[in-house]
Structure formats: C-alpha cells, structure tokens
Amino acid sequence: MKKVMESEEIDRALRRVAHEILERNMGAGEVILVGIHTRGVPLADRLAGYIGEFENEKVPVGTLDIGLYRDDLDRRPTTELGATSMPEDPTGRTVVLVDDVLYTGRTIRAALDALADLGRPQAVQLAVLVDRGHRQIPIRADYVGKNLPTSPGERVTVRLQETDGTDGIWIEENA
Amino acid sequence: MKHFLSTDDVSRADLESLLDLSDEFVEVLARPIPKVPALRGKTVAMLFFEASTRTRLSFERAAKALSADTMSFSPSTSSLSKGESLKDTALTIKAMGADALVVRHKSTGAQWRIADWTGLPVLNAGDGAHQHPTQALLDALTIRQHFRSLDGLRIAIVGDIRHSRVARSDISTFTTLGAEVTLVAPSTLLPVDMDGWPIKVAGSIDDVLDSDVIYLLRIQAERGGASVFPSLPEYVSRFGMTRERFARLAENAIVMHPGPMNRGVEIAPEVADRPRARILEQVANGVAVRMAVLFRLLGGEVHDA
C-alpha cells in the first residue's frame, strides 16, 4: 500500500478548496455544505471550519446518506444508513456536496437524486478530496483537492482522523 | 435476515440495528417528498387472511414510501371463498411476481408454512394470538424516542394478555432490550403457558402506576376476551386507565395502546388524547419500522444462503 498524501497535504488541499468555494460564490452567504456519508461528513465539517477561519462566517453543514438512492442495491449487501440532515431548507441556496473520492460518479448521481427530494437548490456544486478518474456517467467536480491518476484495478483508500483515527490517502493494487 | 416472523429469535444487536434504521426512515417520512427510490421495481404482496385496517394500510404506506409496488387481497373477495388452499393462494401470488409477502392469518404459524412453500421473504403481520413482530418494533421505537433506551425501564402490560399477539411480541422485544416487564390482567386473561417467561405479574393496575410505561391492551371480544370477566365496569375498576389513575402516574411516564381502542374500557376517553398517551406516535412510527424491515429484507440481494 503506497501512501500518496500526508496529513499536511490534505490540510493544504482542503484550505485551497475552501478558498475556491469562497471565490467562486463571492463569499459563503448562500452556501450550504453537505457531506456525503461516510467520509464526506467530516470533510464538510473541516471545510466549514476553514471558511469560518478565513471569513469569520458560519456556514451551515448538512449530511446526506445516499444508501436509499443507489442504483446497485441489488448487487451489494445492505449497509447501515447514516443520518440525513439538512440544517436549513436548501431551496434557493447553493449546495456544495462534499465527498472523499470521485470515481465512477454513481454516488454523486444518487446524491443529486437524494438532494432533489429535500428541496430545490439554486445551484449544486461538488467538492472532492480526490478525483481518481474513470467516470461512468457525465459528472465532474467543481473543486478537487488532488487529481490522482489511477488504473481501475487499483484501490484508493482515504482515512480521516474523525472516522479512522489518522489522516492519509493510500493506493494499492486490488487483490 | 431472510424473514421477519417473530421477535423471539431476534438478537438485541439486530433489534437495535432495526431501530436505528427506523430512525432514518422517521427522517425520510418528515421530508417534503417523503419517498425514496430504494425498492423501485420490487413488489410487495399483502395477504391479509384476517381483517385489518391499520396494519395493512401501514405496510402499504411503508412499501410505497420505498417506491415498491403493492398488491393486496382480502379474503372475503378472494378465491379462498371458493375453496382454494392457503398453499395454492401463496404460490399463485408468487407466480404473479411478488418479491415479498406480508401475511396476517388467524392460525398460529401460517407464515412459517408460507415461507417454506414460497421461498419468498415473509413478514408476519400477525398470526393468531402468537406474534406481531412489527408492532413490537414500533412500540420499542416509540419508547426509545421518549426514554432514549429501554435499558432498566419498568414496563407494565395491562389487559388481555392471553389473546394478545402484541403482548407476546412486546414481552420478548422489551426484555431483550433490557426492560423489566410486569403483566397485569385478570387471572382468566393471563396466558396458561408463562413458565420461563422473564416477567413479573401483578393483580391490579394500581400496583404498577409507578412504571415508566403503561401499555394497555384491547379487550378482544372477537377472541373471547370479553366473556372471561363479570362486567366491563368491573374490568375498568381494576384494570382501566382512568383519569384518577392517569393523574397518579410518574411524571415522565407514557401510556401506550396498540389500537383500536375501546375508549371508556381500557382507557378513559380524555386520557387517550393527552400528549403523554403516545397512541398516534405509535401509529406514525409503524410506517417507519415497516420501511426498515422491508428495506432490510429486500434492499440487498444478499440473503444468507
């Protein structure tokens, strides 16, 4: 297993993404950050922390579990659902979806469906820590912490302090 | 989990995981669009061989909120009245493409037979006086929402225990989740087979007014429940939740009833409408727990082979 990102690099990448979110949206006034379970949730919290640090502005943070919206429910075992919570009505706001790894794009498709059932945002943007390529549907990220070229046979593992006790990103050959 | 037939053989961890899942469906049902696509393309058949309004509607609502299709059938208008056997009815509905069966039947164990015959996931919506496991789940969820946990709670179940499948499912669920259960009933309405049940017994509702939860059961006239005590006023005097008794309950206590209520018998009419009577919350939670069970049984391909 090869480590491709250290804790400090993750930090720097997230700070840059926080700046980009502020720049693109001309401040954080209309923004709601929504973390996708599991590791999108702490990432959204961290982005909100940086935005608060840079602008002294408190950004609402929501969570989204897409387990009920997957298109492959038949092909995988049932997992526990995480909480879905929206701190404010997303209608008319700019929702920034936050996830750890962007790969096939299917998770994001499901997240867009889930979000549509919760309200009608003015705009939806996507922030990911890692974009590893190999999209299977036409989805792209607005903010990318790190572009990581991979082959489909490799596995990308993100670990975060909040969920795994340590920060880092690894690549390994799939067994 | 392939079927949901009884609460007796469900572990504490599995119960808690189902309740956690139910919490998420409570949230789904509170959304502006209270529907998720999780079971799109699945068909749930409702086989109610015994009359039911609330349970059947609750299962239908649960299935539809998960985007499953439903088929339903009632015995009076079905081929059963033409003499078709239970097995043929079940196999016929399977052949029409049902992915799961929700079954209520007056005979204990009918659901187990149907599960064997069809091989489909079967949800027990009540079999005779035996089990009603989704009712027990919704009761546990309602109690957990109020007290956060059932651990160490004192729960009194009052009334017609003998004829009650709700009581049987509740007793095993509540005790598995760590509560202490006391049954209160005229001796004629206690089960004859209580050996080994992890419960206590009291002779009057006045003995249990300090409980955390008072769970009132319906006098089931259709199962002979009204013929075994002298008169309704006498029943009320020893087992009814009257206004006076309600006033003596512990401050944080709640009152529950599985419905349909006989106002003025098990429960005084005005007590049933107090906020501490959680009867309508129970009904609302019923949809969420049935979604949880349907999702658990149908939401993933992987059934233990």
Image (cartoon, rainbow, N blue to C red):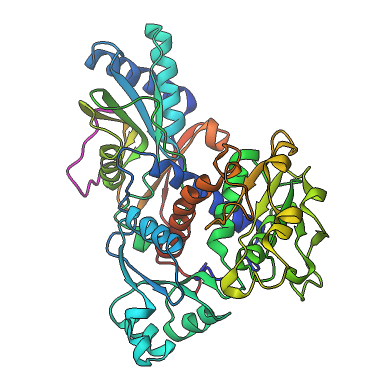
Q: Position of residue A142 (x, y in %)?
A: 23, 28
Q: Is residue B88 above or below residue B208?
A: below
- Where does residue B51 sit, x and y in percent of width and height? 45, 71
What residue is rendered at 42% in x and 57% in y?
A: B58
Query: Which residue corresponds to the image point at 36% horizontal and 35% vertical from the top-left?
Result: A99
- Residue sitting farthest toward the top: A56
Q: Residue at x 17, y 43 (%)?
A: A138
Residue B249 location, quadrant: top right
**Left or right: where A70 falls relative to A40:** left
| Magenta portion: prevailing SS class | loop
Residue A28 position (above or below residue A80): above
The quadrant holding residue A75 is: bottom left
Residue B236, position as x, y percentages in the image: 70, 55
Compared across the picture, whether B137 is left or right of A26 comes to: right
Res A5 visible: no
**Quarter of the image where the C terminus of chain A is located:** bottom left
Q: Is residue A17 above or below residue B134?
A: above
User: In the image, is B177 to the left or to the right of A86?
Assistant: right
Q: Farthest residue to the left: give it.
A: A138
> In x, y percent, where is residue A102?
31, 40
Q: Nearer the viewer, residue B57 or A131?
A: B57
Residue B105 seen: yes
Magenta highlight range: A133-143
B165 displayed left or right of B178: left
